[in-house]
Image (tube, rainbow, N blue to C red):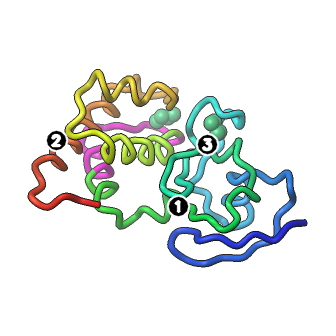
Amino acid sequence: MTTISLILNGKARTSTVLPRDTLAGYLRDGCQLTGTHLGCEHGACGACTVLLDGEPVRSCIVLAVTADAREVQSIEGLRDDAIMVLLRKAFHEAHALQCGFCTPGMLITARDILRRHHAPDETLIRRELAGQICRCTGYVGIVEAIRCAGAELAATPQPIE
Ligand code: FES
Ligand code: FES
């Protein structure tokens, strides 16, 4: 067993993990943060996306020990994030989910897109979403939701961090 200490969703946490434990397994089973979904479990679908030091990673192929002395944010930790608030509203209005299985990873990736691109258009959003798989929606609502949230963010007088 290995002891790790990290900042998880803004709070310091120390845990004991096995060297083979994935970050996704640690979040779900060790921390009861089940908003991190597991789809393919080999890095292909993006359902398990979380932020590691602010960058999106596929937590099914990241070992939990990698998170030692680092900062992890799961979908639960982004509840009050300003961009995420815009995105949740946009996903609701654009009917951007059906079963919701892909949605946590999709939202975290969408937030990353909006942090890196000013008012992205459909072409750019589709290219950026290439690694996120949704088996239900056909992507039209998801792309529209991110476009709308990006347009709203661009029209916001104060930049949102
Ligand atoms: S469950 Fe991690 S990428 Fe699919
Ligand atoms: S809404 Fe079902 S997988 Fe995307």
Q: Position of residue 92 (x, y in %)?
A: 30, 46
Tell which of 4 and 76 is nearer to you: 4
Mark sitting earlier along the chain (3/1): 3
In the displayed structure image, the side of residue 139 where residue 16 appears, left or right:
right
Task: Quickly name the residue at label 1.
Answer: 73
For the N terminus, the quadrant is bottom right
Which kind of residue does numbered mark 1 sit on?
Gln
| Residue 121: assigned label | none
**Mark 1 neighbour density, 10 Å: few (under 14) some (14–19) many (20 or more):** many
Q: Position of residue 108 (x, y in %)?
A: 44, 48
Q: CA distance from mark 3 to mark 1?
A: 12 Å
Tell which of 11 and 35 is nearer to you: 11
Q: CA distance from mark 2 to mark 3?
A: 27 Å
Mark sitting earlier along the chain (2/3): 3
Q: Tell me the element at label 2.
A: helix
Task: Quickly name the residue at label 3.
Answer: 58
Q: Which residue corresponds to the image point at 31% horizontal and 26% vertical from the top-left?
A: 124
Which kind of residue does numbered mark 2 sit on?
Ala
Which kind of residue does numbered mark 3 sit on?
Arg
Vertical position of residue 146 compared to residue 65: above or below:
above
* Disc 3 residue: CB within 8 Å of ligand 1: yes
Q: Which residue corresponds to the image point at 61% horizontal and 57% vertical from the top-left?
A: 34
Tell which of 33 and 60 is nearer to you: 60
